[in-house]
Image (cartoon, rainbow, N blue to C red):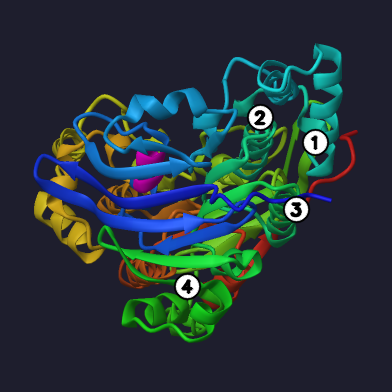
Amino acid sequence: MNHRSTIPALTVEGLSVLHGERALVRDISFAIPAGGVLTLLGESGSGKSLLAQAIMGNLPAPLRCEGRVVIGGETTNAAAQSSRHALWGRRLALLPQEPWLALDPTMRVREQVAETHALVRRSPWRGARDLAARALASLGLQDAAHKYPFMLSGGMAQRVAFLATHAAGAPLMIIDEPTKGLDLERRGEVLELLRAAQAEGMSLLCITHDIWLARALGGQLAVMLEGALIEQGEAAQLLAAPQQDYTRRLLAADPGSWPAWRASILAPGSGAIVQVEGLTKSFGRQRLFGDVDARIAAGEIVAVSGPSGSGKTTFGNIVLGVARPDRGRVQRAQGLAPTAFQKIQQDPGAAFAPRIRLRQSLRDLVQLHGLDWAELEALLARMRLAPALLDRLPHQVSGGELQRIALARVLLMQPALIFADEPTSRLDPVTQQDVFALLLEHVQRRRCALLLVTHDADIVRSVASRRIALGSSAPAD
């Protein structure tokens, strides 16, 4: 039987994050009991991930923080960030929002998980490999054991990153968007892992936009808006009877409550933007999909569905012409330039040069293609993005902000077809609803085709006219 300590796993007192004299996160206080969970909801850019980095002691320059952070009874001045570095891995762990930031691109998957067991938990190397193999199998990742991270889908990378982080056995884990980009079955597996870890005594600070996960985890819930906690309490009570208008909007904007927007979209045009015949693709002996036929017309929204690792991103890349099928052909409408086919990346960080400020990246695009900067500014304003964000490097804005900037850049190109790969996975429900309204308006006005990848069945129900179903299958012939 696990006897939990009466000392809180984490106490945060008056924590603020500042840039110069401007407070980005203001006067945050909460406590998580040993073995407990606090789920943090809030819109993209509200400061949730900054709060996590401040607790870890990993804020980028020139940001600084004030207040106190108490971990397992050990008090540190929030400003003395290096004082918490010795706790990393053994007492405090962070799973970042972007799974590739938690993975070594040069190491195979099983070795990464095993390395944590071996180096942090001092397991013999052979035993560490066995533990890693069992952990991967528990999440349906046994076939990924010998792959490198770049060979994984976003959902697979997310699960591997969780296993590698959890293997350290830290009693307190901060986990940022653990179910992002996962289908319902995989979300359930992650939930069960988190519950099992809690049962063993692990405490959780869970940052998420996933209201389903917040409800399922229970415990405490806090809502963050513009850098401040506006409401907190027992999860079940707060979700049933929120007191703040913003919290009520957040819950009402969950995709399960969306109307059937597809009914308002113009009927598809007669001409196909893309027609594919007999598309087949395998990696090694594993077939992703075979003999797929599809026709995508102007003004049409088509969802690509299937479990994580079934080849949805690969299928879209083949449609765009940036990947080749093993068999089959793709026929694109005549007279369209290559730039008429655009992609919204699943990982928005991969869409921008990491060392060039966003304003310069976008100005280069506008100049190269003779576009209108004022139209870009209008798109950013529509998505509630402050112009000052463009003066930062890509890693200095939140994942949700970067995702919306990437979307604005694609819409500015006025493409004939957009391949949107989990285009709102980093957005809170309110912002997600606003962004989809903009996307659908663009489809209507520009007669653009939208090929959509999302794991959210409610979004598919609401916006897609039909879907292309892919599924993992047996080894290829």
Left or right of residue 394: residue 85: right
In the image, 244 versus 461, the foreground residue is 244
Contact flag, marks 3 and 4 (Cβ < 8 Å): no
Q: Place residue 65 in its image quadrant.
A: top left
Contact flag, marks 2 and 4 (Cβ < 8 Å): no
Count neighbours of disc 3 (C-alpha within 10 A) and say few if under 14, some if 14 to 19, many if 20 or more: some
Circle 4 sits in a helix, a strand or a loop, which is it? strand
Residue 188, position in %: x, y? 73, 59
Name which residue type carries label 2.
Ala
> What residue appears at the point 77 percent right and 48 percent down from the top-left corner?
291
> What residue appears at the point 33 percent right and 44 percent down from the top-left corner?
68
Q: Is residue 349 above or below residue 264?
A: above
Q: How many angstroms separate mark 4 from mark 1 (CA)?
A: 34 Å
Left or right of residue 100: residue 127: right
Secondary structure character of the magenta stretch overall = helix
Name which residue type carries label 4.
Gly
Residue 460 seen:
yes
Q: Which residue is mark 2?
A: 168
Q: Which residue is mark 4?
A: 233
Magenta stretch: give its range.
Answer: 51-55
Residue 46 seen:
no
Mark sitting earlier along the chain (2/1): 1
Circle 1 sits in a helix, a strand or a loop, which is it? helix
Q: How many angstroms separate mark 3 from mark 1 (CA)?
A: 17 Å
Q: Place residue 159 in its image quadrant.
A: top right
Q: Which residue is mark 1?
A: 135
Residue 411, position in %: x, y? 30, 55
Name which residue type carries label 3.
Ala
Mark sitting earlier along the chain (3/1): 1
Instruction: Give the number of the disc on residue 362.
Output: none
